[in-house]
Amino acid sequence: MLFSVIAFAATLIGALAGLGGGVFLRPLLAFLSVGKELASFTSSTTVLTLCLTNLIAGTVFARNSGDDEDVSLKDIFQPYLILISAGSVIGGYLGASLIPAAAERIINAIYCVVLLLLVLLLVLRDKLPRCTIRKRVPSFLVGLFTGTMSGFFGIGGGPFQMSALLLLFGSEGRTATKQSLFITLCTTLAAIFRYIMNHYYDFSIAVYTIPAAVAGGIIGAAIIRRMKHSQVQWILITSIATIFCFSVANVWNTL
């Protein structure tokens, strides 16, 4: 029951902020003394479920409503998003390979600095020059960079992908959320493929978290349709700021 409640809360916030939910779920599972591999596998399967459910539910809601302001499939299946996704998948492998080269304390400290920078940039977004990347090479490189950061810090790429979509690709709140979940879907599929290749299939906790992710994805898709782009952006800022505070506390405890 506890795993279901945690998964529902994490995936609901992840659906509203475009973070996927893994950035919340995996640390919480670790806090509950769930093993590293089991926590990662459970988080990956749960986030994959969330992304699929939310994108499908959002498409159905948009088709039934006929509202032009709803995010449609054409907003998601853009060539530059495919390139960002491809870059993120490759970057995830590169980032994970860099982990042994740095001490955990250094990784956590850098993570805090990066999160603080993202919060500041998002708060000041409206005062910064507008940037709308659409070319192939820059799109791939951005995906490669955000994927590497995600793999290096050992989290889902949501905070970096959402920030990149808002700051560099000119996407607005609700649209960026769906686009970020699509990218997360691709990177999570790659992560689960790695587990399959390593013959790791432990669904002992996922049987509780997957149904919760379905509920979080559907409810999140219903709620976000009634939100303004600016409200979604502030949910993202609040979420990243919360992660930053917990990360700082974690670094402080290791001193």
Image (cartoon, rainbow, N blue to C red):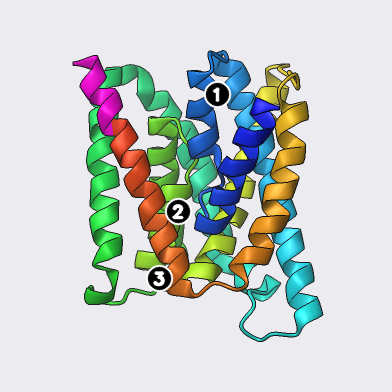
Three-letter amino acid code at the position of disc 2: Gln
Marks 2 and 3, how far apart in space? 14 Å
Whether residue 254 appears in magenta in the rendering, the answer is yes
Residue 6 seen in the figure: yes
Three-letter amino acid code at the position of disc 1: Leu
Q: Is residue 45 above or below residue 180?
A: above
Element under disc 1: helix
Q: Position of residue 163 (x, y in %)?
A: 38, 58
Q: Which residue is mark 3?
A: 133
Judge the density around disc 2: few (<14), some (14-19), many (≥20) Cα neighbours within 10 Å. Answer: many
Magenta segment: 248-255
Q: Quadrant of the C terminus?
A: top left
Q: Which residue is mark 1?
A: 29
Q: Is residue 218 above or below residue 45?
A: below
50 horizontally vs 157: left or right: right
Residue 224 occupies quadrant? bottom right
181 horizontally vs 88: left or right: right
First of labels 2, 3 by sequence position: 3
Marks 1 and 3, how far apart in space? 37 Å
Q: Main secondary structure of the magenta part?
A: helix
